Image: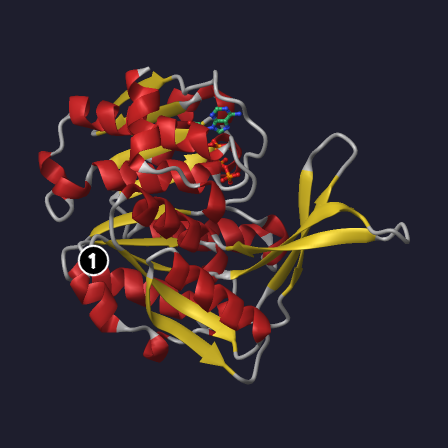
Amino acid sequence: MDLAAIGELLIDFTPSGVSEQGNPLFECNPGGAPANVLAAMTRLGGTGAFIGKVGSDTFGSFLYDILKQNGIDHRGLRFDPKVHTTLAFVHLSRTGDRSFSFYRDPGADRMLTFEEVDQDVIRQAKAFHFGSVSMTHEPSRTATLGAARFARELGKTISYDPNLRPALWNSLEEAREVIIRGMEYADILKISEEELIFLTGQTDLEKGAELLAEVFRGRILLLTLGPNGCFFGMDGKYDRLPTYDKVKTIDTTGAGDAFLGGFLFRIRPYFGRLQELTFDELRDAVNFANAVGSLATTRKGAIPAMPRLEEVMALLEA
Ligand code: ATP
């Protein structure tokens, strides 16, 4: 198996117009960055498994079906009768900016314990992926960090996308401290410009990347820049690539997860021997990932928007 990912799997209620009575309507969408990354990987033709927790309720069953429909191994999904599946409502401001309100006190996603982590799934995967949403609270913080440590001990290639959601943390100081702790285990770090500023206080990409290198000792840094593509680095050398901005963008939800799933798919032959990847091969994988990310913006939602390999190849060849 290519990739095991641990973390949140939840429902995103996205605004969907108004009812006949004039009340706001919300559409029930599967959400959670680690599951999105896995969906990008399987849609392209790779294989992946999810590790996490939902409630023993209708939403939990819906999310289980989504994993199944997307060919994602769900042995590591736990159902908890004592807590509800986590819910998030997405609000759009008049200017189109997104904000979230989470119903997670506690939600099932943050109740996964280390004992519940299916170690066989990690053993069987060549790479492991995690984020920081599952590290905001215990017991899932220990479960996530423990799983990352276990994957590291087994020599897996480890990818990490902090995906900062300030509203979920008790304090931003704690967020910074725990997010940096996660870097200890990662070979590949994917962050956004906003997260670079949060972590380093720097808006200059190269200066920020150099500051980050003091705490992130892994090999590959991917800094995605939305419609401006990606700034990336390996072993202290940096470069940037534009994305495919001629596509018809309608919804950027999950673009970062599509990008990372695409990147991991492309470097699969190097899982377990990442030190052999050359800078040219890194650039090729970033270009591929840009194509996957940009295609994901042409459809609504995250998981349903992930492109197939043929679509990506057609865009790359166009
Ligand atoms: P999210 O958290 O919403 O998933 P992110 O901040 O992690 O997003 P972005 O930098 O927004 O990730 O996007 C990831 C990649 O997707 C970009 O590097 C780019 O290749 C592609 N992308 C994003 N937005 C656009 C766009 N408007 N047009 C074309 N490509 C885009």
Location of residue 69 in the rendering, given as x and y in whole percent from the top left corner? 40, 59
Location of residue 135 in the rendering, given as x and y in whole percent from the top left corner? 46, 61
Residue drawn 49% across and 37% down?
195
Residue drawn 52% across and 54% down?
31
Residue drawn 26% across and 62% down?
149
User: Which color scheme did the rendering employ for the protein?
Assistant: secondary structure
- Left or right: 218 with respect to 276? right
Location of residue 248 in the rendering, given as x and y in whole percent from the top left corner? 53, 23
- Left or right: 74 with respect to 267? right
Callout 1: helix, strand or loop?
A: helix
The one of 131 and 213 positioned closer to us in this rendering:
131
- Left or right: 250 with respect to 116? right
Location of residue 21 in the rendering, given as x and y in whole percent from the top left corner? 90, 54
> In the picture, residue 86 is in which quadrant?
bottom right
> In the picture, residue 275 is in which quadrant?
top left
Query: What's the amino acid at mark 1?
Result: Arg
